[in-house]
Structures are given as C-alpha cells and as structure tokens.
Image (cartoon, grey):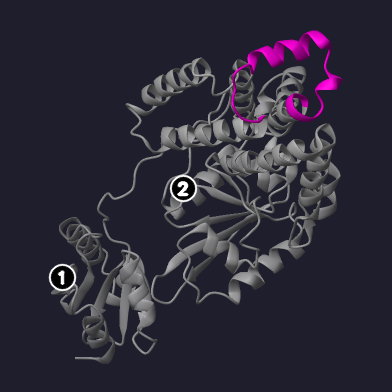
Amino acid sequence: MEAILQELKDKFSNDNDFFAQRDYLFEAPVVLLGFRTLIDLTKTKLTLQKYIDTAIATKQTLDELKLIIGEVKDKEINGNEAIRAITQGKLIIYFENDPTYVVAEPIMKLLDRAIEPPINENVILGSISSFTEDIHSNIGILRKQLNSDKIRVNSYFLGSDETTELSLLYYEGYVNMELIHKIITQIEKNKSKEINNLQKLSRLMGFNSWVTISKFNQTELPQEAANFLRKGRAILFLDRLPVALVLPAQFWDVFVLDSDRNLPLPLMLFLRALRIMGALVTLTLPGLYVALVSVNPEVLRIELALSIAQSREGVPYPAIVEILLMLVILELIIEASIRLPKNIGPTITMVGGIILGQAVVQAKLVSNLLIIILAATTIANSTIIGLQTTLSLRVSKYVIVILASIYGVLGILEGLVLVCAYIASLTTFGIPYVYFHTEKDEVKNG
C-alpha cells in the first residue's frame, strides 16, 4: 500500500463516516475515498459508470477519462491536499497501479438550503433573492447579478486544523488596486489562522477588536453587493456565512440603499432624509428628555414645563435613573424578541411591552412622556440600515444620556461631538470611514 493512501486511512481511522471502498474504473483497480454524510455514493458510482460507458463508446484512454471526471493529482504531492479535498466533500479516486489520483466532484447529499428571500433585510423594489451558506453559490449569484467579465475572484483556504474557504471579489477597473493588494497581503500572511467567526476574521485583517462600528459592512442582498462592487469596494465571502462582507465600510452605507434608485428621485431623497433624521432622533431624544427635565427646564415654555412636571408627579427618582431603567428594560425586550421562537415572539413582546408600559406608568415609576420618548427612539432606530449600525447607535445614546444628565443641553452637544470625532477617526486600510464616494472615483480607479 502506497504512502499517501496509508496516510489518508491513518488520518481518518477513527472516523466511521470515512469510507475507503475498492472498485474498478476502466478495468483499473481503484480505491474510492470520502465521507458518507457528504457524498451520495450510489448516485456517484452510477454517474462514473456513465462516464466509463461513454469513454468505451468513443475509444478514450484511461488518461483521457481521468481528465473528464476530475482534477488529476500526482501522488508525490503532500497528502494535505487530498485531506483537504475530502473534508470539503470531494471524492478521491485513488489508482493503485498508477502514479496519480483524481479529485472528483461527486453527487452531493443535499445539505444546503435553496436560494430564499432575505430574512434580515426587507426589499421594497428590487431582487428578493439572498445569499446562502454555500460560498460557491454566493459567488455565482453575484456573477449573475453583474454579468461582467471584469469580476475577479481570489480564493484562499485558511486554518490548519479547521480549513475554511475565504473568497475575495472585486470589480477590475472600478476598484483601487492598492486596496486589493493590502487585503491580499493581510490574508496571505495569516493563512494558518482559524477563521470561524467575524471577530477572528477582523483580527486576521488587522482590525481592532474593540471598535463599536464594524469595519465590515454586511449585506445578504446580491443587488446591494453588486452595487458595492461598482463603487470600487471589495467583497469577502466566508464559507457557511450567508452574507457578503464589504470592505471598506463607510458612513453613508447607513443611509443609502441601491434599491432606493428604483424609486423616483424625490421619493429616494425623502427616504434617505428620514433615515438621517432617525439616526439623530435615536442619539439625541433620550438625552434631550433628561436635559430638559432635570438640568435645563428653563429653556421650555412654562406650559410645557408644567405639563412635564405634572406627568412626573409621584416618580420617586431622578430622570437619569428613570430613563436608564426603562432603556435597559427595552433592550431586554428587543433581545427577547430576537431569541424567542418566531411563532410566539411578536405576540409575547407586544403584549409584554404594552402591559409593562401601562403598569409602570400607573405605579408612578415612570412618566407618560418617557414612554412616548422610548417608543419614538425605538422606531427611529429601526430606520437605520444594518443590524450592527443600529446596535452601535443604541450604545452611543447611553453616552449622550449620561453627559446630558451632567451638563444638560450642552452635554448633548458634547456627546454628538464625541460621536462625530470617533466616527471621523475610523479608517480601513487607510480609507476614512466618512469618505464619500462619487462617480469621479470610478473613472479615477479605472
């Protein structure tokens, strides 16, 4: 028995899922190697038999048949390549009396879901297909969306114990090649690292793990991913992750969707203005309540100040404690709505929110006005594009609330300055987060 075959059998000797089945291919003795849970062996052997029948009918040689059924490899090559092929679900056809083996695409067992509508991103006008867990399907979906011969794909296998496929896509002629070279260099020098979540991928790319705004912009919509490529961005696909990771993420991605352009221009601008307003309301409204109630009530009209004071009559603690208490409860409700089963989650959170809101007001634990403030803040936060961005805004508003409780209206301004300064300080491979893309950039990059 040759060394590479023995190496494969030793590697998977304790794995009952692994098979090494002897057979004949074109009267040549072979050993079929692979995983039972990934390969439909019966259908695969029937397909191989069809290739053999065709080869006999057309008088092909064994070497010609090998080239048809898969990729021919030399046995002298290190066995790690064969091991990686097996773990990826490939079929190894090992020829016993030949210095080569073949890596073939078998009939796979159906382990991936079909292309479905997006789950986390709603589309008003545009394609409703979304990415799946299979990296090759995602690349194919994106190629079909663009239909251009200038799309380039670089694929890498990362990790030593757990091999994960990572693909880099870019639009030649639109992208700044300096950005692509930096990304490739970063990947190449960290190919041995295990990548099974986005935090590890961020560390691989050299990003700080403690930033609250992700350097990746995520989308599960092929239409949006294609638009990012046209704007000169790079796309990363990680196998088993059903989203496209856009590099670099930029500030205006929070407010701009490519599907907006399917609407008339005035309506598109109106929607984008609403999103900007939603971000400002999310950041400032809770802090404004605290500032005007506890620090600067003199800036209000006397009628409004009296109305607010009357709504807070009987509330036993300051406005800052009141709002922080309700904000934390609201965060718990939002998190519960995500974790609960979909068939009961909306009902429980809606009933729980209504009952809880009414009960705390009647118990004089919070004011009526605060319930309105929290509802408006939550609704405004939901207008922002991207789950990670909404989470970042939800965290940022606490900073502004605390500053507002100390410095009043001036604290809100200080908090906004801090948030803006932090956003302005972010860069990805030398590209500022607040960089604004224009059509001229496409011409310059081309």
Quarter assignment of residue 240: bottom left
Measure how far apart labels 1 and 2 are at the Cα level.
30 Å
On residue 99, which mark appears? none
In terms of depth relative to the viewer, which is nearer, 133 or 420? 420
At label 2, which amino acid type do we have?
Pro
User: The residue tagged with tag 1: helix, strand or loop?
Assistant: loop
Q: Position of residue 6 (x, y in %)?
A: 22, 87
Q: Is residue 299 magenta?
A: yes
Q: Position of residue 78 (x, y in %)?
A: 39, 86
Q: Is residue 198 magenta?
A: no
User: The residue tagged with tag 2: helix, strand or loop?
Assistant: loop
Q: Position of residue 344 (x, y in %)?
A: 33, 26
Quarter assignment of residue 258: top right
**Within-10-Å neighbours for mark 1: few <14, some 14–19, many 20+:** few
Q: Say left or right for 53 vs 352.
A: left
From the viewer's perspective, is residue 187 above or below residue 416?
A: below
Q: Main secondary structure of the magenta part?
A: helix
In terms of depth relative to the viewer, which is nearer, 296 or 391? 296
The residue indicated by pointer 1 is 16
At label 1, which amino acid type do we have?
Asn
Q: Say left or right for 393 vs 81.
A: right
The residue indicated by pointer 2 is 242
- Which residues are the magenta region? 292-318
**Is disc 1 in contact with disc 2, using a CB cutoff of under 8 Å?**
no
> Does any portion of residue 273 appear in the rendered image?
yes
Residue pictured at 64% horizontal, 51% vertical: 212
Q: Say left or right for 89 vs 393.
A: left
In terms of depth relative to the viewer, which is nearer, 82 or 426? 426
